[in-house]
Amino acid sequence: MGSLIFLLPVLLIAWLFWTQRRRQQQMRVAQDQIKVGDEISTTSGLLGTLVSLDEEEGTIEVSPGVQLRFVRRAIVPRTQIGAPVEATSSEEPETVDLDKHDDQAPETKAE
């Protein structure tokens, strides 16, 4: 029974190291496969299109004419984070008219 108490934490720590190593290897393979023109994400969640890439950094276009530089390790393919590359829904997104003003004041509750 005493050896089980010692063995269980050792196995748990070994499993944690193994899964972390596997995750790092998957990330490294995914980062090696990205190329200019791919839809990508950064590790912080910024989405864009890869414009240029070298050994140390990559440039991401987040909107037309807006380019940001990131360290290469922070750039991952969108498929790696589980986000679909294209929307699967055929519905049009709802548009909101920001120029339309409501002349009525909002109702408030008096206490």
Image: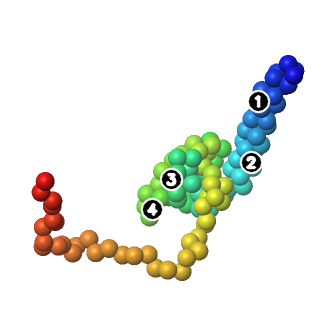
Image quarter hosting the C terminus: bottom left
Q: Which residue is mark 4?
A: 63
Q: Residues within 10 Å of mark 4 (few under 14, many from 20)?
A: few
Task: Please state which amino acid type lies under the numbered disc 4.
Answer: Ser
Query: Helix or strand or loop: what does disc 3 sit on?
Result: loop
Classed neighbour count for the residue bearing mark 2: other residues with Cα under 10 Å, few (<14), some (14–19), many (≥20): few
| Distance CA(mark 3)–CA(mark 4) | 11 Å
Instruction: Examine the image and state in which quarter residue 39 appears.
Output: bottom right
Residue type (three-letter) at the residue carrying disc 1 = Ile
Q: Quadrant of the N terminus?
A: top right
**Residue named by callout 2:** 26
In the rendered structure, which amino acid carries the disc numbered 2? Answer: Gln
Tell me which label, 3 or 1, sits earlier in the chain: 1
At 82% from the left and 21% from the top, the residue drawn is 6
User: Which residue is under mark 3?
Assistant: 46
* Residue 10 seen by the camera: no
Q: Earlier in the sequence, mark 2 or mark 3?
A: 2
- Circle 1 sits on which residue? 13
